Structures are given as structure tokens and as C-alpha cells.
Amino acid sequence: MVTETLTTDAVIIGAGLAGIVTAIELLEHGKRVVLVDRDDQKVFGGQAREALGGMTYTGTPQQARAGIKDSPDLAYEDWIRYGQFNEEDTWPKAWARAYVDHCVDDIYFWLRGRGLKFLPVITWGERGMNEVGNSVARYHLLWGGGYTLATRMIEQLEPHSDSLTLLFNRNVQGLTETAGRVSGCHGVGETDGAPFEITAENTIVATGGVGGDLGLVRKLWPEEWGEPPETLLTGAHKYSDGKMHQQVESIGGNVTHLSRMWNYATGFHHPKPRKPNHGLALLPPRSAIWADYQGKRIGPEPLMGAFDTRWTCERVSQQPRGYSWSILNRKVVEKELMISGSEHNPALRDRKLFTFLKENLLGNKRVFNYLASDEVADAVTASTPEELARKMNQVTGGDEVDGAVLRSTIEAYDAEVELGPELSSDPQIKRIGVLRQWKGDRPKVCNFQPIGDPSAGPLMAIRQVILCRKSLGGIQTDLEGRVLKADGSNIDGLYAVGEASGFGGGGSNGVRSLEGTFLAGCILTGRFTGRAIGGAG
């Protein structure tokens, strides 16, 4: 079989957001680029196409209009404290500093200059459970979501078609070395097995993390979380399997912190899976009861979303059976619950303003109807706690949930809700009060809604398992995206961007993220690396 051969200035392995942004920078610097990807062209843009589209910024016009006093120094202080870095994390911390210093000019205004907009309302994610996370609101949602971001970035490639070669359904299986430097890559066609070889002055790895290989995820499972649960789902790209990390390691590249993961404890089985173990994630409602496999409220510190995503994963992973339940009602679902991603937020994705405002201000009946349908196997509805318990047991095929216990769980929580944040000693009730003080969060948080309220029914229970999403570690890089060895020297001709690089430096977030740094991290690492290569020759 004849080997397909190409020669170019730069080859980018992976056509997700980080790879595309790197290509834009290189092309705008006059470089010839080959962008090679294992998947089909119809999903050009990778996981960004499916993302909700939130990004963390510090010092935007939206923050100024909202009266938020923020600065790069404050954001860096939050980032380093919350990320719990090691003393050896020199490059991760350097990338963290670069993010807070450059996110507005190099990401926010760069996207604005290419026709993209952000919603005026800023929400406050990752506040921190036992210590401060984000000390101010920083989460900006892109109008059009991740799908619009990906498609707009692809449009930026079109004026450079003479200098750009797109290769899809190509499985890169190794890096090529010549005279002590990386000189390209080689592999085979994903469908036909035909060999190919690309020779390039610069080779950029943009292949994502390792969350698509659940076997590898289990091997890397954080020790403090205990044993990985029997059931895990993935929301990562199916080809985010760590193979290129292994290739980089085999030639001396330093891969660090892959056991640092950004998972969600609120995953459920995708009704129409497009890959093995395909899951979706709930953006967890704050007013729901987070219960264990028996329908008992997890405690003594109750679990709830928007405060510490990693901690909820740790707590659920340590539970017997390794899954949990969200106990709520129709009113809480319609007011508070979102399913993460562009797929389940069509009004946002398609930029239908009236529908978007209606769903967010008057209640999202579409999401409730979707979860209440027979299509979603992990969700059930009922009129009474006893009926709900029976249906929960049907989902799991066991008899762990006792109706009387579930009723007691709901009634005990509702009694605290009725007391309100001033009189209740319940941490969740007090946190709901805190959430409702911020105007960006108040429209999506119920005004102390009891779960057993008959007028807010029916009741709903959703079984939640851990969904593997992002790798917070990866290939170690300097601020020019060059792949580093363990001794700190770089591998000539080799670069890494996006999630493959742990969003810069092999782990720029530390052990946990301030949220909203992933799409933005792909853009920042792609721009820094593309400019460094483009300006060097």
C-alpha cells in the first residue's frame, strides 16, 4: 500500500478547539499547516461543539457594569489557593498567572473581535465549600454556546485554504524523530488502514486528555477518592485516550498530574449514546436533596452544586454503590436544573433570544418533560415518596430505597426549608440564602422551595453517577507551548496545547478548577503557542 506523504511548516494533531486556534495563529503568521484528526469532518471542532460555552474572566466590561471589583492579582490568589499546587508546579503556576493576566485581551476581546458575544449576566461558580474558591462572580456564558464557538473558529480558517490541509479519519500512531528533533508524525487511515506520513518543522499535540478511556481513568483514580465506582460514564471525546501522551513520554517528554481529574458527580446515561458509556451531566439544582443509594441525605455536610465540584466527586465516590440520587420536584427542575452542553440547550445554541429568556425566567418545562419521559432511564417521577421509592428501586433493580425512609428524608429537609436561612442550622439552606443574594444567580435559584410541596409536584428522582470529563494534568509545556523533559529542557520541534497540555504546563488548574477555564484554556494555549512558532521564523 502506497504511503501518503505531506510536507508542511506545522502539523497539528487534533482538530478540536485548541488545535483550530493554534492553526489560526500559524496561518495568520503565514505558515503552512496540516490539521490531522482521527474523527470525521462532520464533528470538526471536537468536544467544544458539545460544550455549554462558559468561560472565566477577570476584569471584563460585564463585570464592571455589574459592579464587580476584580483583578488579575485577586484571581491568581484565588486560583493558587483553590488549586492546591505543589512546590514543584513551576510551569503550571506560570500558566495560571498567564491566564489571569491575558484572559481578557487574548481571549475575551479576541473572541469579541471575531463576532462572538457573551451574555450580560455573570454567574458565580465554584465558590468553595470549606474555603473560598472564586471570591467574586467570573463565569461568562457565550451566546451560542460551545457549538457557535467551534463553528466560528472553523470559519476563521476559510480565508487560508491555500495554506491549510485538513486530514480527517487519520489515526496518528507515532512521532517521527530526525537528527535529534521531532520532525512530524505518522499513522494509518482510521477506516482504510492506509499509511500516511507528515514531515513538519513543528509538531503540535492537541489530542485532548484521557477521559475517553475509562480503563485508564480507573488506573489513574485519585487515591483519596477510594476505589473507582463500578459504573463510570464519560463525557470526554471518544478518542481522548492518552495514546499521544504515551508517545510523548516514549521520547522523553514529561507528562504530569494525570490523576488530577475534572469529573462530575451528576452524570446520567445518555438516552441515545454515540459512544460506549456515553453520559450527560446535570448542572445540579441547589434546592434538591442529594441522597445516597438508600434515599438518605448525604452528610453530615450536605452536598450541593456550584461550590466544590471535586469534593462532590470525592464524597460520591466514597459512598456505598458509588452513585447518588437527586431528589427534587417539578418546580425545582424547571427553575434550577440544566443539562450541560449545547445539545440540551438549543435556545442558547441557536441563539433564540425569546425562547432562551422564557425558559430561564418562566421555567424550563422542556427539560422537565425530557427527564420525565421514558427516554431517560435514570429519572423517575411520582406523586408520593413511597411511589417514588418503588420506582427508584426499579431503576437499580434492587430494594435499597425504603419509602418510609425517603419520606422522612424529604420531611426533615422541608422542615429546615420552612425555617429559612436565619433560623435553620442546615448548611444547604444557608448557602441557598447566599446564592440568592447575587443577582446573577438569583433567577436560577428557588425561593426556599420545599420538596414535598404538593403544588410543586410531581416528585422526581434522578440517579447520578460520576461522569469523567477533563484531565487537569498532561504534557508539560513552557509558555511558548514547547514540550519539556523532566530536566526542564525542551524537545526540539514538539509542542502541546489545550487539554493535552493540562491546559498549559502539565496542570495549570492544580487539583481543581475555578470552573470555566477549559474552553478558555484551549484558546490561550493555542494562541500563545501559535504566536511563538509563527513569530520565530
Image (tube, rainbow, N blue to C red):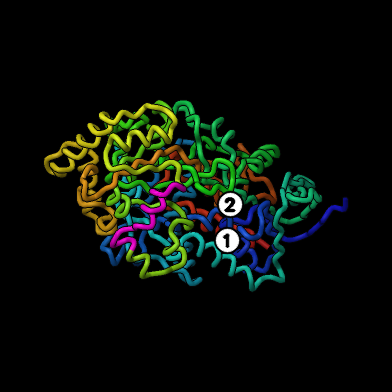
Residue 439 in the image: x percent, y percent?
25, 59
Above or below, 529 relative to 478: below
Label pair 2/1, CB-CB below 8 angstroms: yes
In the picture provided, is 387 more to the left or to the right than 228? Answer: left
Above or below, 30 relative to 79: below
The foreground one among 107 and 488 is: 107
Type of amino acid at the residue the image marks with label 2: Val
Residue 371, magenta (yes or no) = yes
The foreground one among 12 and 59 is: 12
Name the chief secondary structure element in magenta: helix
Label 1 belongs to which residue? 21
Q: Considering the numbered disc 1 on the image, is that residue within a helix, a strand or a loop?
A: helix
Mark 2, residues whose alpha carbon is within 10 Å: few (<14), some, or many (≥20)?
many
The foreground one among 325 and 132 is: 325
Q: Considering the numbered disc 2 on the image, is that residue within a helix, a strand or a loop?
A: loop
User: Which residues, given as a range, are shown in magenta?
Assistant: 359-375
The foreground one among 371 and 361 is: 371
Q: Which residue does the image show at 46% across and 67% down from the upper left?
A: 350
Label 2 belongs to which residue? 497
Type of amino acid at the residue the image marks with label 1: Val
Residue 339 in the image: x percent, y percent?
41, 51
Q: Which residue does the image show at 50% across and 47% down from the upper left?
A: 271
